[in-house]
Amino acid sequence: MLIEIPEVLSRQELQQCQTLLAEAPWADGRITAGTQSAQVKNNLQLPEQTEQSQALRGTILEALNRNALFLSAALPKRIFPPLFNRYEGETNTFGNHIDNAIRHCPVTGQRVRTDLSATIFLADPDSYEGGELVIEDTYGEHAVKLAAGDMVLYPGSSLHRVVPVTSGARVASFFWLESMVRETERRRLLFEMDMAILELRNTQGDSAPTVNLTGCYHNLLRMWADV
């Protein structure tokens, strides 16, 4: 399930992030790559211990925690602290790879199963050429290049790549999530049911069918969730 979530960051939050990133001490992006990924990764990344990285993480996590669409789609149990990357000049691409199944979080000491991968775009798409995130699934390839502040959420098991940036700079936040509902199809079913309940409430209010369907949703979540 690939979901685009608009305006995760407010205009003010986006401006704050862009200001911090403009002065960030970028380093070789391979610092967090696995063995296979390191062979095809050629970008810049913000080291996790910098002041800018810590401030940016707080902004991103606060925005995620108030976004109802994200919470419904991801049902997050653990979020790996957001990281930040930059593609420009000679460090301009990331070839085909699949993210590591388990990530160790140095901030919390926990291990996070990467059920979902996420990218929040932080640069205006008109400010750079190329840089599309290409995600492959059973329905083919999906090229994603969103407005600054928008996010794409997709299965961590997906083969994906970043197309070379030929001009300008592509800047983004990326991270992984462990969901309370591990199985992709169960998570999809719950998301679609939640969206249907929302539509029913908007059109019919809290009618008896709406209440009954809401009960079914929560009973399924109670059955499947691992918290």
Image: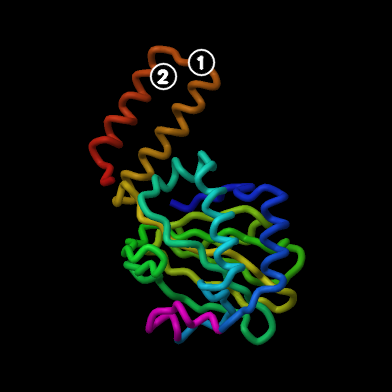
Residue span colored magenta: 28-38
Residue located beneath label 2 in the image: 210
Mark earlier in primary sequence (1, 2):
1
Residue neighbourhood size for the residue with mark 2, other residues' Cα within 10 Å, grouped as few (<14), some (14–19), many (≥20)? some
Classify residue 41 as left or right of residue 89.
Answer: left
Classify residue 188 as left or right of residue 120.
Answer: left
Disc 1 marks a residue whose amino acid type is Gln
Residue 120: x %, y % from top left? 58, 58
Residue located beneath label 1 in the image: 204
Vertical side of 111 occupied by 5: above or below: above
Q: Is residue 34 magenta?
A: yes
Q: Secondary structure at mark 1?
A: helix
Can you tell which quarter of the image residue 56 is in? bottom right
- Residue occupying the far right of the picture: 127
Residue 147: x %, y % from top left? 68, 56
Residue neighbourhood size for the residue with mark 1, other residues' Cα within 10 Å, grouped as few (<14), some (14–19), many (≥20)? few
Residue 22: x %, y % from top left? 72, 71
Front one among 127 and 19: 19
- Residue occupying the far left of the picture: 223
Q: Is residue 37 magenta?
A: yes
Q: Are marks 1 and 2 in contact (CB under 8 Å)?
A: yes
Q: What residue sits 26% from the left and 35% below the top?
A: 222
Disc 2 marks a residue whose amino acid type is Thr
Vertical side of 123 occupied by 31: above or below: below
Vertical side of 176 occupied by 38: above or below: below
Scheme of image coloration: rainbow
> What is the distance, in whole Å, between disc 1 and disc 2 at their CAs?
8 Å
Can you tell which quarter of the image residue 223 is in? top left
